[in-house]
Amino acid sequence: MVAGYSTEYTQNMEDRAVWRQLAWWFGGIVVGFKTWTVLLIFVFSVDWSTAWYLILNHVAWLIGIILVVWGPLFFWYRLVRVRLRRERLLRSEWEISETIRRRR
C-alpha cells in the first residue's frame, strides 16, 4: 500500500461529505424560501387568478424536483432488487434438496 494513501482517501471522503452537506443545506434553503414565499402569497392574496399563476409558474420547479428525486430512488430500487437476487442465488447454491440427499 502506498504510504499516505489511506490518509488521502479519508481526507477526500471528508471533503465529499462536507460538499454534500453544503449542497443539501443550499437546496433546503432554496426550497424552504420558495415554499414560504408561495404560502405567504396565498395567504395574503385570496384571488384565484393569483393562485393559478403561482401553480402554473411552479410546474417547472415541481418537474425538476421530481426528476432530481427520481434518479436516486430508481437507483436504490434497482440496488435492492439486485441484492435480493444475489441473496437468493447464494442461498440456492448452498441448498441441498431432499431428493439428492436420499439418492446418496
Image (spheres, rainbow, N blue to C red):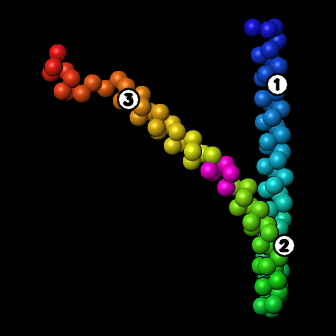
Estimate the spatial distance between the alpha carbons at disc 3 and disc 1, rounded to whole Å.
38 Å
Look at the image and give the residue range highlighted in magenta: 70-74
Left-right relation of 86 to 30: left
Tell me what residue is drawn at x 74 percent, y 66 percent: 63
Question: Callout 2, which amino acid?
Answer: Thr
Q: Is residue 73 shown in magenta?
A: yes
Most extreme residue toward the left, as rendered? 102
Q: Nearer the viewer, mark 2 or mark 3?
A: 3
- Structural crowding at the residue carrying mark 1, measured as other residues with C-alpha within 10 Å and reported as few (<14), some (14–19) or many (≥20): few
Q: Is residue 25 shown in magenta?
A: no
- Residue 20: x and y in percent read 79, 42
Q: Mark 1 or 2 closer to N-term?
A: 1
Tell me what residue is drawn at x 79 percent, y 8 percent: 2
Q: Give the labeled residue for mark 2.
A: 37
Q: Mark 2 or 3 closer to N-term?
A: 2
Whether residue 40 is visible here, answered yes or no, is no
Q: Nearer the viewer, mark 3 or mark 1?
A: 3
Most extreme residue toward the front, as rendered? 103
**Mark number, residue 11:** 1
Relative height, residue 75 to residue 35 (above, below): above
Relative height, residue 92 to residue 43 (above, below): above
The quadrant the N terminus occupies is top right
- Secondary structure under tag 3 reads helix
Relative height, residue 56 to residue 6 (above, below): below
Q: Give the labeled residue for mark 3.
A: 91
> For residue 59, what is the image quadrant?
bottom right
Estimate the spatial distance between the alpha carbons at disc 2 and disc 3, rounded to whole Å.
54 Å
Whether residue 7 is visible here, answered yes or no, is yes
Estimate the spatial distance between the alpha carbons at disc 1 and disc 2, rounded to whole Å.
39 Å
